[in-house]
């Protein structure tokens, strides 16, 4: 099972800009390396990341082999209403991971 | 008998040669530069890119190219009328110029992105922001890499 971690404040004031940190455990094999026997190691990376806030997309990223292993993404969003944030990672070899976090807005 | 002058010439020559070998050969470098230019053109569609508004924070001296923390912030009010639509990061010397493309909107509140990249060689790192009015802004930082990423069998 894919291991992912997100950090979202549990509560925020309405209209406040909150910082979201996401981390996915993934080797991000870049496809440019070779084994000791000389054959290339096939590419295996996360290519897409999407964050939705109560079903509305607020952040999306396209990742490339030049992202470090265990890709970290730190971004912001406005706390508009209480609800859930859904995070989704997609990648090579049918890699898929989802995570959700709830936030209460006062 | 080797004179001191001959010896020094030899030492300096060897040192210069080893330095040169650590760099990409000119053909490869030209290919990389062309790839970077075409990648940027693909993003901007040939629009002019102005310098300013964008701030790319990255350590100028990188000990380990496998994990390079970088932060891109754009000076923007992030309102419906005036916001950052996308932030793209490119490197000059990697086998592929792309690092990450992030798509933001007015709901982002603050135009900032922090992540970690792999940098293969000493060169420029470029951050380009696309604003909602269709303009493009960039910032570039020259970095020095001592241990490069993806380099087990020489520069590829």
Image (cartoon, rainbow, N blue to C red):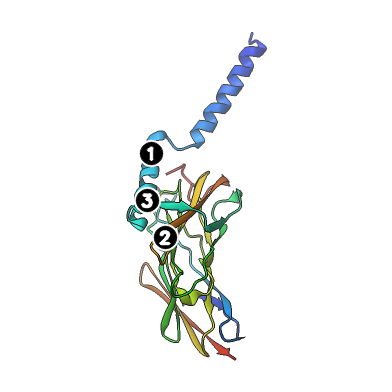
The residue identified by callout 1 is B30
Per the image, label 2 sits on a secondary structure element best described as loop
| CA distance for labels 2 and 3 | 22 Å
The crowd level at tag 3 (other Cα within 10 Å; few <14, some 14-19, many 20+) is: few
Residue annotated with mark 3: A39
CA neighbours of label 2 inside 10 A, class few (<14), some (14 to 19), many (20+): many
Q: Mark 2 — on which chain does it sit?
A: A
Residue situated furthest right in the rendering: B4
Q: Nearer the viewer, mark 2 or mark 1?
A: 1
Work out which quarter of the rendered image holds the N terminus of chain B and state it.
top right
The answer to whether residue B40 of the structure is visible from this angle is: yes
User: Looking at the image, which is closer to me, B152 or B39?
Assistant: B39
Residues at marks 3 and 1, common chain?
no
For mark 1, does the 10 Å Cα neighbourhood hold few (<14), some (14 to 19), or many (20 or more) residues? Answer: few
Q: Position of residue A92 (x, y in %)?
A: 37, 67
Q: Which mark is residue A64?
A: 2
- Determine whether label 2 and label 3 are within 8 Å by CB: no
Which of the 4 quarters of the picture holds residue A96? bottom left
Whether residue A2 is visible:
no
Can you say whether A12 is above or below B8 in the image? below
| Dot 2 or dot 3, earlier in sequence | 3
Q: Quadrant of the C terminus of chain B?
A: top left
Q: As rendered, which of B105 and A60 lies closer to the eye?
A: B105
Q: Position of residue A24 (x, y in %)?
A: 50, 71
Tag 3 and tag 1, C-beta contact below 8 Å? no
Mark 3 vs mark 1: in front: 1
Identify the residue at image location x=37%, y=58%.
A42
Image-based side of B80 in relation to A106, left or right: left
The chain identifier of the residue carrying mark 3 reads A
Do the residues under discs 2 and 1 have CB atoms within 8 angstroms? no
């Amino acid at each position: 099972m894919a291991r992912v971690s997100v950090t979202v404040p549990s509560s925020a004031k309405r209209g406040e800009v909150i910082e979201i940190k996401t981390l996915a455990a993934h080797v991000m094999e870049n496809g440019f390396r070779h084994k000791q026997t000389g054959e290339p190691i096939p590419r295996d990376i996360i290519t897409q990341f999407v964050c939705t806030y109560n079903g509305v997309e607020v952040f999306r990223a396209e990742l490339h082999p030049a992202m470090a292993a265990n890709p970290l993404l730190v971004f912001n969003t406005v706390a508009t209403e209480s609800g859930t944030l859904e995070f989704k990672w997609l990648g090579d070899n049918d890699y898929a991971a989802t995570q959700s976090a709830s936030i209460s807005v006062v | 008998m080797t004179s001191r002058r001959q010896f020094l010439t030899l030492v300096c020559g060897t040192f210069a040669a080893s330095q040169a070998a650590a760099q990409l050969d000119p053909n490869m470098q030209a290919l990389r530069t062309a790839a970077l230019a075409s990648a940027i053109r693909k993003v901007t569609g040939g629009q002019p890119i102005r310098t300013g508004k964008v701030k790319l924070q990255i350590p100028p001296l990188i000990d380990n190219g496998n994990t390079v923390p970088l932060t891109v912030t754009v000076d923007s009010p992030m309102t419906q009328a005036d916001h950052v639509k996308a932030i793209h990061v490119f490197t000059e010397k990697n086998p592929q110029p792309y690092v990450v493309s992030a798509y933001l909107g007015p709901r982002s509140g603050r135009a900032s992105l922090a992540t970690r990249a792999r940098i293969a060689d000493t060169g420029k790192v470029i951050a380009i922001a696309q604003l909602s009015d269709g303009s493009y802004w960039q910032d570039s930082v020259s970095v020095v890499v001592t241990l490069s990423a993806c380099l087990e069998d020489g520069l590829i």
